[in-house]
Image (cartoon, rainbow, N blue to C red):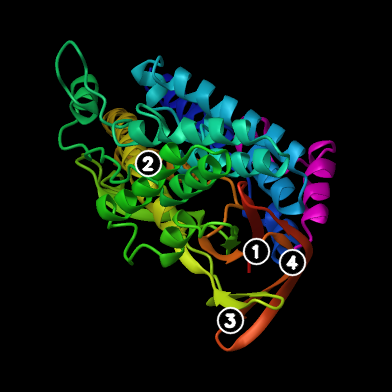
Amino acid sequence: MVMKKTKTILLFIKIIFLALIIFSCATSSRAFLEMDFAVLHHDFYSAIHMIVSAQSGNRVIYRENNAISLFMDKGLLEYYAGNYAASSLDLQNAERLIEEAYTRSISQSFLTYIANDNAKDYPGEDFEDIYLNVFNALNYYNTGNIDGALVEIRKLTIPNGKLDMLSRKYEYIDPSTGANLSAMAQRETGISQLPEVKSVNFSNSALARYIGALLYQGAGDPDAARIEFDQVYRAFNTNNNIYRTAVPPAVEQARNIPSGQARLNIISFTGLSPIKEEAHIIHTLPFQHSLLRSASFKLPVLVRRPNIITRIEVAVDGKGSFDLELLEDMSAIMEETFNARFSNILLKTYIRTIIKYSVADLIAAETARNVGEMAGFLSALAAKTALEASEAADIRMSRYLPDKAYIGGINLDPGIYSVTISYYSGNRVISQERHTDIMVNNNRLNLLQSVNLR
């Protein structure tokens, strides 16, 4: 009987070990090194080709359960390359999958809720869901579809739109009991002192509002443009944890264009967004066996990437020069919106770890009673080794969102101009863009876009 129990216990541990290994597989960041190199050197076509070739071959970069990252990355790279129709299609696919993932998440059972994140389809981050509409609005503008561009912006800015709902997304309350998510988790698992799920302290994007204002202005809707310009100021005033400087003067300059003149507006995106890396947090657990009282929680954290751009100068031939101004620290918004999902991930990881270690603790105690202390020790050691090896943080995300958004502009007589955009790192010009034959008309939106992701 004792031998049978021992074999059963060892078989159980092996099954747990193998199953968790299978379900915790995550894409290695090394697969992106060549793509990152191409992107940093503005070889966007090569980066796109790498994605297409890899996905059609045997060594895919994006697994089937990471389709959102695939469409986000390819869509952003297509935008940078000037392939606006292809970019729009990719970003629409990413948005559709994010919506489907959210619909599934609110109907899932609690047991599904605590499943290993790597085993499930990647649901996308809130900041990805926000910025895909911003870039899709620019895609529509670049293809001459102002109405389509405004639809993308309104998805963010209307009442109960994405920005409005963001602060309430993680404040789920059980309608029958009034319990919040942490309280519901305590009730279902019997685990006390669970981590609290945080809310998002961000509700308005100055970048989305500014682009919306320019689009309405160009479409001949001054009242709607005025509202959106006002919302830029409101974003700065109500989200000072994100916007820590004054509103750029370029906002007011774009709002008040002298009669008879046209304005050339410029938006520049610089640097690359943070990426997720795996962090290890050691936590003490209340179990009998000493080996199982310390667990390593593997959690995703956002890590910023360097942005060497310190100044952007725009020179318009024959009309002087000016510097672009920081409008939105996109990475700061990504960090703030990720905080709520991180606390949600922490809650799930904590519950999952408690449950798995509880099983291991019971098995170790049963083995010690029936076989001996050494067998119990070996059982606990095997279980702990398997559990820690099987856990992996979910570090899936889009890699090619920008770090910062700068704006500026100049009022001109209608006509054709040449523009040079110089990117500085300190006092050194590290790259220049020359744009010729830029048509600037009055009573329409003239928006020049530039990208330097170094």
Q: Amino acid at mark 1?
A: Asp
Could you tell me how far apart the alpha carbons at marks 4 and 1 are, in whole angstroms? 10 Å
What label sits on residue 395 in the rendered view? none
Q: Which residues are magenta?
A: 42-69
| Residue designated by label 1 | 413
Up the image or down, 419 lies above or below 281; here it is: below
Query: Circle 3 — which element?
Result: strand
Q: Amino acid at mark 3?
A: Ser
CB under 8 Å between discs 4 and 3: no
Q: Residue furthest front?
A: 260
In 3D space, how far apart are the residues under numbered discs 1 and 3 (Cα atoms)? 32 Å
Q: Secondary structure at mark 2?
A: helix
Q: Position of residue 191 (x, y in %)?
A: 19, 30
Residue found at the far bottom of this picture:
427
Which numbered circle lies on residue 425?
3
**According to the image, label 2 marks what residue?**
227
Q: Nearer the viewer, residue 233 or 6?
A: 233
Secondary structure, mark 1, is loop
Q: Please name whichever residue, 76 or 31, is drawn nearer the observer in this view of the structure.
A: 76
Q: How many marks?
A: 4
- Pick whichever of labels 1 and 2 is earlier in the sequence: 2
Residue assigned mark 4: 417
Label 1, label 2: how many angstroms apart (C-alpha)? 27 Å
